[in-house]
Image: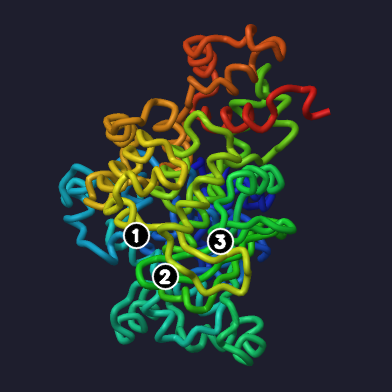
Amino acid sequence: MLPTSTECYRALTARDPRFDGVFFTGVTSTGIFCRPVCPARTPREDRCRFFAHAAEASQAGFRPCLRCRPELAPGLSPLEASPRLVQRAMARIEQGVLEEESLEGLADALGTSSRHLRRAFLKELGVTPVEYAQTQRLLSAKRLLTETALPVSEVAFASGFRSIRRFNASFKERLRLDPTGLRRRAPGRERLEDDPRLPLELVLAFRPPLAWDELLGFLAARAIPGVEWVSEGRYLRTVRLGEVSGVIQVGPPRERTLPVSMSHALWPVVVPLLAKVRALFDLDARPDAIAQVLADDPHLGWRLGQAPGIRVPGAFDGFELAVRAILGQQVSVKGATTLAGRLVEAFGAPVQSAHPVLTRSFPPPRAIAQANPKELSKLGILPARAQTLVSLAREIDQGRLVLRPGVDAHATLAQLESLPGVGPWTSHYIGLRALRWLDAFPHGDLWLRRAIAPSARPGDAPSSRELLQASEAWRPFRAVAALLLWTFPNREETT
């Protein structure tokens, strides 16, 4: 998981953004740990210790740098966090699962014991799952203290602490920083405190390059009326998490960060909300690793050259994405978007918004699970597809099906395909976006087959089996390959 010490020091000396979040440097002479892109003077190599995770550096007694701010570093891509058990557990912890259930509950959901999960974390990361979660909470709190005017008490609760006393003690013990003192040193504090009810504005880091226009174009074509809106290089959407609702705005990117603005009412869910935004925009991607596999491929190399830094659009919510995928079966993107808008209008809850085009949140699984399929058919949804949506909603509402990063992709796709009306194309599309499975590949897709045909004539398109065989060369980034083929069907359309 961790590059060699020589490679780490070379990247640190060059301030190489490709390694941002891949490792952290603890400086023994200062007791501080930094990102590879830190603008501070590079320490001598013999004073550097390298760690794969911020939690490991914190556990070793180093405190986070106030200049490069390790809490902003992009995360590891799904391919780098091995073994798979640790990868899946990390994804769930970062989504805040340990705020809702015990370590035993997390282990049970992953099909293992808490003892085995603890041993796996210690072996791979050098910390326990609870220590990893604690570091994530503290770094999230540090970010909120630095970037927002939220009162310290609200920062504590938003970060997952249930006690102000425990928050203060942990912050001082683990980060060796005082929360109130850090707030006083925050840049722009005076401006924020003039009106603490202003929208919360934070930033998320990514490894450049970022093909923002292509990413936004993909989302714009599939934006759900009333819920999503793309305008002037920005993505906006309504949000409802539990009893909290509001609106977020993302972009456009600035250098290596993506700004996120959100309604002040969303502060209690800011941590899981940011995790959802990271997944939606695939901000943990490694463009350099993708280029190593795909850049020389005769089908994909020139496409990657058109959009270096292309990302696989994720999903803000797994159920929402799955519904959108089912509505898109054998209909145009525009037709599926129209149906999704009708579904939102009929079953979505109103959301207070300053944007007239953003009016409702996407309906939760329970709203569809309790609906009669005939009600959905009245919206123009085919009866068989309406039954599929109700079946899907019931599985998710009852907790039997989970669609989010960190689940076992193969088992989840099998569950999906056991539902009436869900085949391999739909399951792989959901895996590609909702599960962030980078090797998902809907090989039965006609557009993918035509995209690698020697000409634009449909009769020249390879079979699904031939496309599947060709995709072996694109592992483990077949999801990226699919996106490139969808985005650039042929050379003529890019000239």
In primary-sequence order, the first of circles 3 and 2 is: 3
In this view, the residue farthest toward the bottom is: 194
Circle 1 residues within 10 Å: few <14, some 14–19, many ≥20: many
In this picture, residue 176 sits left or right of residue 334 = left
Give the number of the disc on residue 396.
none
Picture coordinates of residue 77 (x, y %)?
49, 44
Picture coordinates of residue 200 (x, y %)?
56, 76
Picture coordinates of residue 261 (x, y %)?
60, 69
Which marked residue is nearer to the observer: mark 3 or mark 2? Answer: 3
In this view, the residue farthest toward the top is: 459
In this picture, residue 293 sits left or right of residue 109 = right
- What amino acid type is highlighted by mark number 1? Tyr
Q: How far apart are marks 2 and 1 (CA)?
A: 20 Å
How many tags in the picture?
3
In primary-sequence order, the first of circles 2 and 1 is: 1
Q: Distance between the residues labelled 1 and 3?
A: 31 Å
Q: In this view, does 73 lie above or below 305?
A: below
Q: How far apart are marks 3 and 2 (CA)?
A: 15 Å
Give the number of the disc on residue 237.
3
The quarter of the image holding the C terminus is top right
Q: In this view, does 231 lie above or below 22?
A: below
**Residue at the image position 22 percent from the left and 62 percent from the top:** 101
> Are the two marked residues, 2 and 1, in contact with CB atoms closer than 8 angstroms?
no
Q: In this view, does 250 lie above or below 222?
A: below
- What amino acid type is highlighted by mark number 3? Arg
In primary-sequence order, the first of circles 1 and 3 is: 1
**Which residue, given by chain and number where applicable, does mark 1 sit on?**
132
- What amino acid type is highlighted by mark number 2? Val
Circle 3 residues within 10 Å: few <14, some 14–19, many ≥20: many
**Which residue, given by chain and number where applicable, does mark 2 sit on?**
269
Query: Quarter of the image holding residue 58?
Result: bottom left
Picture coordinates of residue 434 (x, y %)?
43, 44
